[in-house]
Amino acid sequence: MANGTTTAENVQLFKDLSSASNFDFVTLTTLKQNTPRKPLMHTTKLNVELLLTGNELMSGDVIDSNSAHIAQELGQLGLEVTRRVTVKDDLNLLADEIAQHTKRADMLVINGGLGPTVDDMTAQALAMAANVEIEEHKDAMAHLLDWCERRNYHLSDSNKKQAMLPAGCEIIPNESGSAVGFTMNVNGCQIYTTPGVPRELKKMMGSEILPHIQQCFSIDDTTDISRFQVFGLGESTIQDIVNEHLPDWPSHIELGYRAAMPLLEIKLTSHHQQGHDDKPIWQKKLYDLLGAHVIGEGR
């Protein structure tokens, strides 16, 4: 280490500094998501994909934070997002992208494009992809009327667009905004549409979409995540150590790194029972290799 100090001295110094900053060194935290559910569709591993739409995302005027929230929420059910795509507000492009997702995904979450303006195209695009008509949904219209009445607003023609949805869809209530979400199955892919407004999205994901997923799917696997913090080693150095001393690292235990100076977080993730059972063994092997460089464990 620099300045002639030992690894142990640097570790203790960092712990002292961290203590002053209220850094919580805790025992190993394991995140387990295993919620009882009423299954309608059975699967062992869901292919979950995200589709975001908006010119503001493509231009960089708005930084996407919604996909991170969606992925974290789905992770509570042990679901892992395998693909994320963002497209501009183009009707044909959006409809084609939805159709492509339905060919390979078990579940698709679409974010954005539910508003009242001409660049909000999700409902029409999904109707095109599903080859169904777009029509006024009585429950969506009832939501709009109630939303306007509670705020003493006039229901404009533009807002009425938010009640024009693909035939056969089921609405997803939106307690915070005028635009309901909706869900439907296309080619065996369950599609959920969500508002682009973060506050509305967060409420809808927690109170409506996650419970709906639990009712629709039997999810055999759970996700188990263990994290610990390392000081004084870079990710390339750690990877070299793993390659040299643990060349048979099992594929069913994912090894991930996240650099956040001056710490490096190591994350071990398993998605099924064999991985859950084996993970403590391999975590100890890695822990023993890194020795005093491991200074904290937790989430």
Image: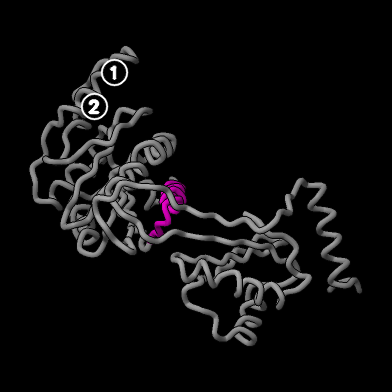
Kindly indicate the quadrant of the structure image that contains residue 168: top left
Q: Which residue is mark 1?
A: 148
Residue 238 % position (x, y): 65, 76
Q: At 19% across and 25% down in the image, what residue appears?
A: 141
Q: Quadrant of the C terminus?
A: bottom right
**Residue type highlighted by circle 2:** Asn
Kindly indicate the quadrant of the structure image that contains residue 196: top left
Visible residue check, residue 75: yes
Mark 2 and mark 1 in contact? Answer it, CB < 8 Å.
Answer: yes
Q: Quadrant of the N terminus?
A: bottom right
Part of the protein shown in magenta: 63-81
Helix, strand, or loop for circle 2?
A: helix
**Residue type highlighted by circle 1:** Cys
Q: At 27% across and 48% down in the image, what residue appears?
A: 216
Q: At 45% across and 47% down in the image, what residue appears?
A: 69
Crowding at mark 2 (Cα within 10 Å: few <14, some 14-19, many 20+) = some
Residue 254 % position (x, y): 51, 70
Visible residue check, residue 67: no
Q: Is residue 72 magenta?
A: yes
Q: Which residue is mark 2?
A: 159
Instruction: Examine the rendered structure and indicate whether residue 14 appears above or below residue 145.
Output: below
Left or right relative to 296: residue 207: left
Crowding at mark 1 (Cα within 10 Å: few <14, some 14-19, many 20+) = some
Left or right relative to 267: residue 137: left
Instruction: Examine the rendered structure and indicate whether residue 207 appears above or below residue 105.
Output: above
Residue 8 % position (x, y): 85, 69
Residue nearest the viewer, comparing 116 with 242: 242
